Amino acid sequence: MVAFFSAGALLGLSAGFSPGPLFALVLSQTLQHGIKEGCKVALAPLVTDLPLIILSTLLLRQLADFKQILGAVSLVGALYLLQMAYETFRCGLQETRAEGSAPQSLGRGMLVNILSPHPYLFWLSVGAPTLLKGINAGQPWSAVSFVIGFHGCLVGSKLVLALMVGKSRRFLAGDTYHRIMRSLAVLLVIFAALLGKEAGSLFGLIRF
């Protein structure tokens, strides 16, 4: 359970602090309308992700006997995590700028999250396979802990971001933010390697 929670927390932290549509909206709402509005945007994944988690998990469960397909999904997940690692590391080297602004924070945050391809790609290639691994091992609470760890750190990191930006607009240009992002990038590469090993096992290329 600790391993599943830790994996979810790592992925949630990386997704939470990495620039993207929701990240930019948190920044713009906080800078223009205050911390409260930025926090509303941060809560959007709690509303939009549940149907996606259920559907992606059910879909992959139907494909449980098709190891080649699951191997391809795991490989896509590994490549996706490597892309996340690259983008995360790059964020640790340069200053991030907020773009755009919008009123009605929670509604706009939900819309941005629904229209973004990242949640769909994450849950189909990384999240759902991890959940099924826990469920198939007879550890449903491990799967639950993964979801809690992921969303706790995803939403929590964006709430912290809104607070930090609201109180100190120099946070995104500071050394602390950049060190955090580079460290997360290294951890993502390790996680991608583990997922790649899983893909090799499903393809029959790795037998240990």
Image: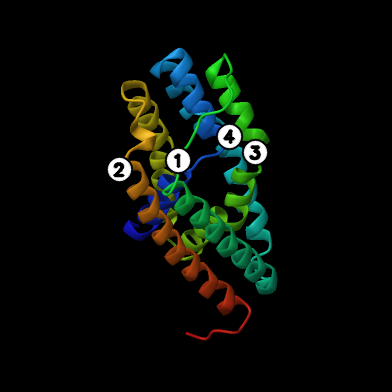
Q: Taking 170 as reference, is 82 left or right?
A: right
- Residue shown at 31% from the left, 43% from the top: 175
Q: Which comes sooner in the sequence, label 2 or label 3?
A: 3
The kind of secondary structure element at disc 4 is helix
**Which is more toward the observer, 83 or 124?**
83
Mark 3 vs mark 4: which is more N-terminal? 4
Place of residue 178 in the rendered image (x, y in percent of width and height, measured from the top left): 37, 46
**Which residue is located at x 48 percent, y 15 percent?**
32
Please say if the residues under marks 3 and 4 sit with CB atoms less than 8 Å apart.
yes
**Kind of residue at disc 4:** Pro
- Left or right of 180, for residue 91: right
Tag 2 secondary structure: helix
Q: Position of residue 190 (x, y in %)?
A: 43, 66
Foreground tag (3 vs 4): 4
Sequence-first disc among 2 and 4: 4
Q: Which mark is residue 16?
A: 1
Mark 4 vs 1: CB contact within 8 A: no
Residue 166 to residue 135: above or below:
above
Residue wearing tag 3: 116
Distance between the Cα atoms at labels 2 and 3? 28 Å
State the residue position of label 4: 21
Q: Amino acid at mark 3?
A: Ser
SS class, disc 1: helix
User: Disc 2 marks which residue?
Assistant: 176
For badge 1, the amino acid type reads: Gly
Q: Nearer the viewer, mark 2 or mark 4?
A: 2
Q: Is residue 167 above or below residue 132?
A: above
Residue 170 location, quadrant: top left
